[in-house]
Amino acid sequence: MATSEKQTMVVGIDDSAHSFYALEWTLDHFFTNFPTNPPFKLVVVHAKPLPSSVVGLAGPGAAEVLPYVESDLKKIAARVLEKAKEFCISKLVNEVVLEAIEGDPRNVLCEAVEKHHASILVVGSHGYGAIKRAVLGSVSDYCAHHAHCTVTIVKKPKIKH
């Protein structure tokens, strides 16, 4: 490679402990050891659900509820990105691109990979069982099969009693 252009790493986050563990793992393994010149450009992406996907197709009254749901989703997205930014700063990683993109996380993350020409996508694993994963659809499974880059699925270690 003749160019000194850094490769991009996209980290997908939501408001779960699992996704923040994945962000922490990424920072610890790829960024904190290189405080002045990390090997990757970091992009943190939060998929903001569509209000209609949260409310569902509730009959009469749904239209009145949507603006409140939209407002809550915007507040949650802002809080998630602010927490991610503080997390990065606490690990001395100041160069980070933070994005909240509306849509299904599976599509949002795969599209972010394309948009940023990412070479690695990092996602957390919620550790759902087979039935819940089959019903909800696993974001990490989807990304592993559809993202056009290496996908790292970070699992939070189980606490041993």
Image (cartoon, rainbow, N blue to C red):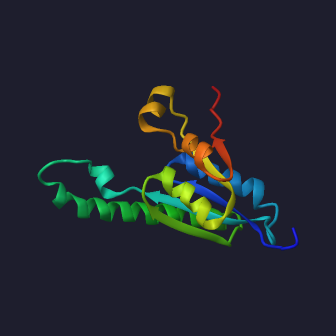
Please name whichever residue, 142 or 154, is drawn nearer the observer in this view of the structure.
142
Reply above or below: 133 against 42: above
Drawn side of residue 83 relative to residue 52, left or right: right
Residue sitting at the far right: 2
Residue at 55% from the left image edge and 61% from the top image edge: 45
Left or right: where does residue 30 sit relative to residue 159? right
Across and down, in percent, residue 15 comes to 48, 53
Residue 160 spot, x, y in % from top left: 65, 28
Residue 10 position within the rendered picture, expressed as x and y whole percent measured from the top left: 63, 59
Q: Residue at x 63, y 40 (%)?
A: 156
Report the residue at 75% width, 61% height from top.
31
In which quarter of the view is residue 93 placed? Answer: bottom right
Q: Is residue 92 visible?
A: yes
Q: Residue at x 46, y 31 (%)?
A: 134
Look at the picture and state if 42 lies above or below 23.
Answer: below
Q: Quadrant of the N terminus?
A: bottom right
Q: Quadrant of the C terminus?
A: top right
Marks counted in the figure total 0
Q: Quadrant of residue 135?
A: top left
Q: Nearer the viewer, residue 67 or 24?
A: 67
